[in-house]
Amino acid sequence: MQTGFRQASLCACSQIETKCSQIWYCAQFINNGLIVAHHFKESEIMLSSQLPYQRTNNFVSIPSGHQRLPVEIAIIGQFPAGSTQHFVEHAFAQQAQHPEFVEEFYESSALIGKPSFPAGGLQSGHPGYDPTAMYTFGIDTRDLIFHRHCGHRAIIGIAGAKGCILRFSMCTPEEAEHDPQAFFDQLFVITIPADRMFSLRFNGTIYHQFSPINSTDKAFFAVSVHTDETYGLSGELLEKVLARQGSIPLLTEPAPERIQQLLLEPDACQNATIIHMD
């Protein structure tokens, strides 16, 4: 896995609104400070699993294909308007004081619950064995770099005062490397309104990116559970995790550099499926 890539994607969706008279979505993307308008036709895209996504106002399940878990997002509840801003700011500040605090790829995080590997090995029958890891992490006013991980992720987050955006591309790493357009053809953009608590469960091998809706406010703060920190790992990475030295950036694999470059294009996300949640 790569850990040295630093260039942020600027494909940040700042506003999404539904035109009631047409089945079109209008989204504005920030590109080097310029607001560029795009239109997206409501899609009935069938993924490789041949299943359309399912949704209600506060829940969406998007099949990811390739025998992976679907991406599932739910709105748990709503706080009074503007009330999450203080919490999010305070949570960022408190996290920064944690001894396991790190910041990389425009994502700050801290390992708050280490996995347990008796004798440093994968002894699942041992009563002290627990491969679960718990992290706090936050997305501020910048876009997290598009990336993927090994293993499953279960996240509870609280959106900031302007809301947040979750993006997922269902293409495989092989598709992303050999056919970059497949990355964008299988792109989903989900908006979470301000002051919401939300849950997210997905297979971390899916390329994803989190961003603020408005770059004047932090996107969200969250707790992430890695259900098996060793899943899919080998070599030096596995050794570090077994030594309880894991971190979110250590396990992060940025999308191919060509994808990162294409994300800078003003029409890069024109084929994305837009889902606005309540």
Image (cartoon, helix red, strand yellow):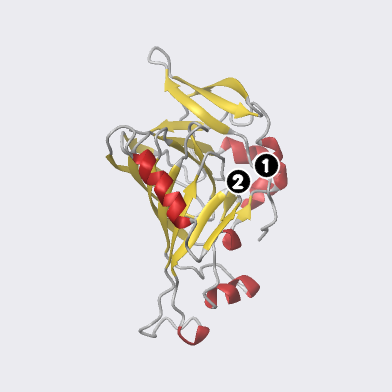
Q: Amino acid at mark 1?
A: Gln
Specify whether residue 71 is in view: no
Is 226 rendered above or below residue 259? below
Q: Nearer the viewer, residue 93 or 156?
A: 93
Sequence-earlier tag: 2 or 1: 2
- Quarter holding the C terminus is top left
Q: Provide the secondary structure element on which disc 1 rests.
A: helix
Q: Nearer the viewer, residue 252 or 141?
A: 141
| Residue identifier under label 2 | 145
Residue 85 screen position, x and y as percent: 38, 39
Would you say 197 lies left or right of 134 here? Answer: left
Q: Nearer the viewer, mark 2 or mark 1?
A: 2
Numbered label attached to residue 155 = none
Q: Nearer the viewer, residue 130 or 113?
A: 113
Specify whether residue 103 is in view: yes
Q: Provide the secondary structure element on which disc 2 rests.
A: loop
In contact (CB < 8 Å): disc 2 and disc 1: yes
Q: Quadrant of residue 32?
A: top right
Q: Quadrant of residue 150?
A: bottom right
Q: Amino acid at mark 2?
A: Ile
Could you tell me how far apart the alpha carbons at marks 2 and 1 are, in whole angstroms? 8 Å
Q: Quadrant of residue 19?
A: top left
Numbered label attached to residue 260 = 1
Furthest residue to the top? 21
At a point 41% along the width and 80% down the height, the residue shown is 129
Residue 166 screen position, x and y as percent: 47, 41
Residue 153 screen position, x and y as percent: 44, 57
At a point 53% along the width and 53% down the height, the residue shown is 108
